Image (spheres, rainbow, N blue to C red):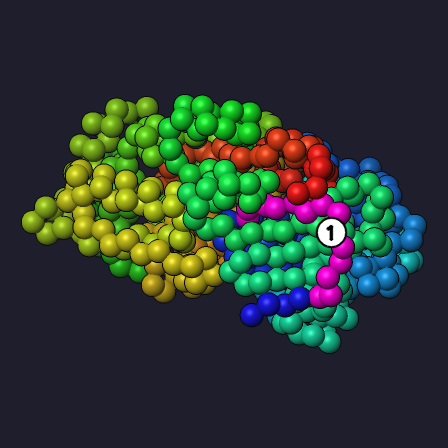
Amino acid sequence: MLWLLPAIAIAARLERGNGPEPSTLDAHRCQEVACGNVLRDLYEGLVTEDARGRLVPGMAAHWTVSGDGRTWTFVLRDGLRWSDGRVLDAHQVVASFRRAFAPATAAPFAELFFDTLAGARAVQAGEAPASALGVSSPDARTVVFRLERAAALDALLTLPIAFPVDVGGVARHGAQHTRPGALVSNGAYRLVAWTPQANLELARNPRFHAARTVEIERVRFHVTEDASAELQRFAAGDLHITETVPPQPLDRLRARFGSRLRIAPYLGTFWLGLNVTRPPLRDDACVPGSRAVPCVTRGRALREALSLAVDRDLLTRHVTGLGEAAAYSIVPPGIAGYTPATLPWATWTQGQRVEQARALYRAAGYSRGRPLQIELRYNTSTPHRRLALAVAAMWRQSLGVRVRLRNEEWKVFVGNRRQRVVTQVFRGGWIADVPDARNFLGGFAGDTALNWSGLDDPGVAQRLARADASASSIERNAWLRAAETRVLGSHAVIPLYAYTSKHLVAPQVRGFEANALDRHASRWLRLDGAR
């Protein structure tokens, strides 16, 4: 099926690999990189980011913050318009925020605002009316936010959940409001075509307030789940930018692609999640522990055994091999003022870890004669398959575990992971939405859409609450580190490596700048000559 608008003359078109099919183009429901990349071209929030990832004015011309840091006032630019030409004012921005936090929207990233935006938690839970949300518009050009505590609201406002969705269009078209011809946006581009499982095409939005600075007329985002096939398309000249690079020796890639290979630090951690709500990984009977911890549950012993048995250094040297660093924490390095917690055996040799893994595996009731049989689920991707095969081999060699590998198309995988019904071990991880340790930890507190492991530990929520109530950044980071230590101690996740961003970028693409969040809006790029 092809959704299409009438063709427009093409001055230049940027061809971008984008990974899996976006799960949605509803900005308030987006929860992954694939939709975020497209949405950042289609929409603009009150605050946005430049090519280097620095915060700059978006819809807002300027803003002020009260002395106590809890009231933020944004003044909109003159003459803002939707892509269909209608006026975009502050009242519509407020209506969009209320829609984002409505219980029916079920926005997965709403919880990132729970400790910050007044009323956010209660409104999404259905415990308070939409008017209780701490966002108001005293006039058509002013948006005011009331916060629970002093916080960096400007960074949060760059997220898709903070983009202005046309509430009237949602009412008219329902779930179809994200289709070409129905989707009304306010960013540098507008949606003109969407061929499911193939590509999405965007055209420059002449009503964007900075349209004259947008040099590329069209952008096509390609579905590229297979990283090896994506590389081949780049080599053949079909793509200007790849979403990633398949695992292979770095020296070989550099020899082949030279300066076209772009590798940079990236605020993200890859981990395997363990479903602690169902056997065999659920906490149940107590088994002998150590002198310090008299007993641990069989589920926890098994989870820690699986974590210990993974040789992270081998993975990053021979399986990923593109500058990734072995991870023993949930939060990656690189966040200002924060020192990540770490697993207590991070400094052991792999031989010592395997010895301890075997002892815990036996304590949990398993052996080579009675092996654990478990399923490892991941979304379809060459890198994910290679990693899953490597982990399965490590578990089998060290412990005798028998692993069934199951790959799924992205949307199916996301749904299964969220429901926690069929998952046992699953591909997880987190890419920073904002450079804040809490962004990596909030999903492990409470029964939320982002708590894929189902960890139910009041101690994590209590420590996060103490962090939220802290009077200083030093105190806040100390409580966040305590929360991270608690999550690591549950072994509900197996950290594997800290990400690097890795792309192939054609020589004619200008303006592509490395940044810690790996965001590259097309409005900042240009092409030297049309294809």
Q: Residue at x 83, y 53 (%)?
A: 206
Q: Nearer the viewer, residue 13 or 409?
A: 13
Answer with left or right where residue 168 lies relative to residue 259. Answer: right
Q: Is residue 334 left or right of residue 92?
A: left
Choose between 316 and 101: the one closer to the eye. Answer: 316
Residue drawn at point x = 36 percent, y = 65 percent? 421
Snapshot quadrant of residue 386: top left
Residue 348: where, in percent of width, then height?
28, 25
Image coordinates for residue 299, horizontal then vertical, percent: 26, 51
Question: Is residue 284 found inside the magenta-colored segment of the image?
Answer: no
Q: Residue at x 68, y 47 (%)?
A: 13
Place of residue 191 in the rendered image (x, y in percent of width and height, measured from the top left):
69, 59
Secondary structure found at label 1: loop
Q: Is residue 293 left or right of residue 508?
A: left
The residue lying furthest to the bottom in this view is 172
Residue 394: quadrant of the picture: top left
| Residue 123 against residue 252 in the figure, above or below | below
Q: Main secondary structure of the magenta part?
A: loop
In the rendered image of this protein, does residue 460 appear above or below residue 436? below
Task: Answer few, some or many: residues within 10 Å of disc 1's Cα (few below 14, many 20 plus, some between 14 and 19).
Answer: few
Q: Nearer the viewer, residue 385 or 107?
A: 385
Q: Is residue 94 visible?
A: yes
Q: Residue furthest left?
A: 369
- Image quadrant holding the C terminus, namely top right
Q: Residue at x 73, y 51 (%)?
A: 10
**How far from the left and from the top, in percent, is residue 461?**
50, 49
> Badge 1 is on which residue?
10
Give yes or no for residue 10 being in the magenta stretch.
yes
- Which quadrant does the N terminus fall into? bottom right
- The part of the chain drawn in magenta is 5-18
| Residue type highlighted by circle 1 | Ile
